[in-house]
């Protein structure tokens, strides 16, 4: 069995932990590894946070990467947990199918997106859990469990968005979405005030997808672009396979983007150029690969933030509190000479349970380079979320405190039900230890 010792344990490159990662080839080898007392499972290690990091042992499911069954008539697919979304899409898109909820990257494992109950750009039913038919799980004792919304439901609910703490997803059966064309009919609308933004998002339910990219954020001021999308139902090209052109950053692009992430003035310049291009030259029809996964264009863009990496934090704000909260963040950024390289807003209206990310209002997501003021920044965010009762997206988390999470809806129930499922806990992560789950 292959293994390696490494410190690059997540996509944010923000962990100072070094751990040993094992790469079992089958369930028998997994059973040998889970005799250890302290470990966590991981997929392709594309998480922004530390929920798949353990300081002693990490068991990777990368070698469990097969498509077990695919019915191209019904759109039902069964896959092993280590397979990447990109591998699935290459196969199913040729027959006119895609995953109904697309996360921000296609280079994530199925086990990972289930463990985090990922969200995407969907205007309604924007959680992966709606499209999972069945999960096969291996617990910390080696027992194989099948669960779904109909049987072993409590285990199913604990596992979907359970951060890998019930065990490892070995395989999953998913229901795909049928599309007539690989093209998205895209509409991009400029807004230059909060009033305009709130006016626009009232109409997003008329579109399958919505997301807003923020060009400028200031006191009581905001500007950006609202992206709306529907699948093209007129062009019949279901047999057109996806072609990925993703590549690594070359030397010039790497150092140019590295400079942008460290300098607020250069970020403003880059944002203005990007804004101009998107406003006046955007394509009205765009391949779903470009619509859903623009950040995948460069496979190693996470390295531009330097050796200390970056964090991505996300929370849901009620609409009536959004201006006040973003004003507070903007004030803190200016006072402490911080900045966000990307700010994304999205209207959401989702129900959930346990520690999943859900709520009604505006989802706010920001990428922030890690620097010497990181500890103070974490304290600020925790106080902000506590004071305003904001729900963080814990699937990306590396900043939440126990004081925050113990007051979060679903925490007590999740902790109690997880204990009843695994009374002798061997599965642990930096995330679960930090938050005393």
Image (cartoon, rainbow, N blue to C red):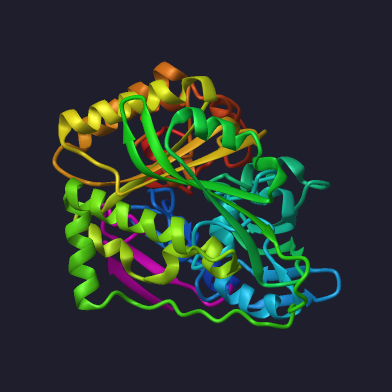
- Residue 245's place in the image compared with 420, above or below, is below
Please tell me whether residue 17 belongs to the stretch shown in magenta: yes
**In the figure, residue 381 lies in which quadrant?**
top left
The answer to whether residue 386 is left or right of residue 150 is left
Q: What's the residue at 28%, 26% (across, down)?
A: 380
Q: Main secondary structure of the magenta part?
A: loop
- Residue 74's place in the image compared with 196, above or below, is below
Task: Give the percent coordinates (x, y) of residue 351.
Answer: 67, 33
Residue 144 appears in the rendering: no
Q: What's the residue at 38%, 71% (across, down)?
A: 299
- Residue 321's place in the image compared with 15, above or below, is above
Please tell me whether residue 38 belongs to the stretch shown in magenta: no
Most extreme residue toward the front is: 280
- Residue 83's place in the image compared with 276, above or below, is below
Task: Give the percent coordinates (x, y) of residue 60.
Answer: 46, 66
Task: Give the percent coordinates (x, y) of residue 416.
Answer: 59, 29
The answer to whether residue 333 is left or right of residue 231 is left
Q: What's the residue at 73%, 83% (across, down)?
A: 239
Task: Give the percent coordinates (x, y) of residue 317.
Answer: 50, 28
Instruction: Pick the residue in front: 351 or 399.
Output: 351
Q: Which residues are magenta?
A: 1-26
Q: What's the residue at 57%, 60% (across, down)?
A: 111
| Count of numbered circles in the view | 0
Residue 437 appears in the rendering: yes
Which quarter of the rendered picture does the N terminus lie within?
bottom left
Most extreme residue toward the left is: 372
Instruction: Pick the residue in front: 182 or 125.
Output: 182
Instruction: Pick the residue in front: 92 or 174.
Output: 92
Instruction: Pick the residue in front: 408 or 423.
Output: 408
């Amino acid at each position: 069995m292959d293994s390696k010792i490494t410190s690059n344990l997540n996509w944010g490159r923000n962990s100072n932990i070094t751990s040993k990662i094992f790469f079992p080839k089958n369930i028998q080898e997994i059973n040998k590894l889970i005799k250890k007392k302290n470990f966590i499972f991981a997929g392709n290690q594309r998480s922004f946070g530390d929920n798949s990091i353990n300081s002693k042992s990490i068991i990777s499911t990368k070698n469990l990467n097969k498509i077990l069954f695919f019915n191209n008539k019904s759109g039902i697919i069964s896959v092993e947990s280590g397979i990447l979304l990109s591998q699935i899409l290459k196969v199913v898109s040729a027959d006119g199918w895609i995953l109904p909820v697309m996360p921000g990257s296609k280079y994530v494992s199925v086990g990972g997106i289930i463990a985090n109950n990922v969200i995407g750009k969907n205007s309604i039913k924007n959680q992966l859990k709606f499209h999972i038919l069945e999960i096969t799980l291996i617990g910390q004792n080696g027992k194989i469990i099948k669960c779904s919304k109909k049987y072993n439901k409590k285990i199913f609910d604990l596992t979907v968005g359970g951060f890998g703490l019930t065990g490892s997803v070995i395989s999953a059966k998913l229901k795909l979405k049928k599309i007539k064309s690989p093209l998205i009919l895209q509409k991009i609308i400029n807004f230059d005030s909060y009033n305009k933004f709130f006016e626009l998002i009232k109409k997003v339910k008329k579109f399958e997808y919505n997301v807003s990219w923020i060009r400028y954020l200031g006191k009581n001021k905001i500007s950006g672009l609202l992206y709306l999308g529907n699948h093209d139902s007129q062009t019949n090209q279901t047999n057109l396979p996806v072609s990925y052109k993703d590549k690594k950053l070359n030397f010039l692009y790497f150092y140019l983007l590295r400079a942008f992430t460290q300098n607020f003035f250069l970020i403003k310049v880059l944002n203005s150029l990007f804004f101009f291009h998107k406003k006046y030259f955007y394509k009205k029809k765009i391949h779903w690969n470009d619509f859903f996964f623009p950040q995948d264009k460069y496979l190693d863009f996470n390295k531009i933030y330097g050796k200390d990496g970056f964090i991505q934090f996300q929370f849901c704000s009620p609409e009536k509190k959004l201006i006040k909260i973003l004003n507070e963040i903007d004030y803190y950024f200016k006072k402490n000479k911080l900045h966000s390289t990307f700010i994304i807003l999205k209207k959401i209206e989702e129900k959930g349970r346990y520690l999943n990310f859900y709520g009604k209002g505006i989802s706010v997501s920001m990428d922030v380079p890690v620097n010497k003021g990181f500890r103070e920044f974490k304290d600020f965010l925790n106080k902000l979320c506590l004071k305003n009762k904001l729900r963080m997206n814990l699937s990306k988390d590396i900043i939440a405190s126990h004081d925050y999470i113990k007051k979060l809806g679903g925490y007590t129930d999740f902790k109690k039900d997880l204990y009843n499922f695994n009374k002798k806990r061997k599965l642990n992560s930096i995330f679960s230890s930090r938050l005393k789950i």
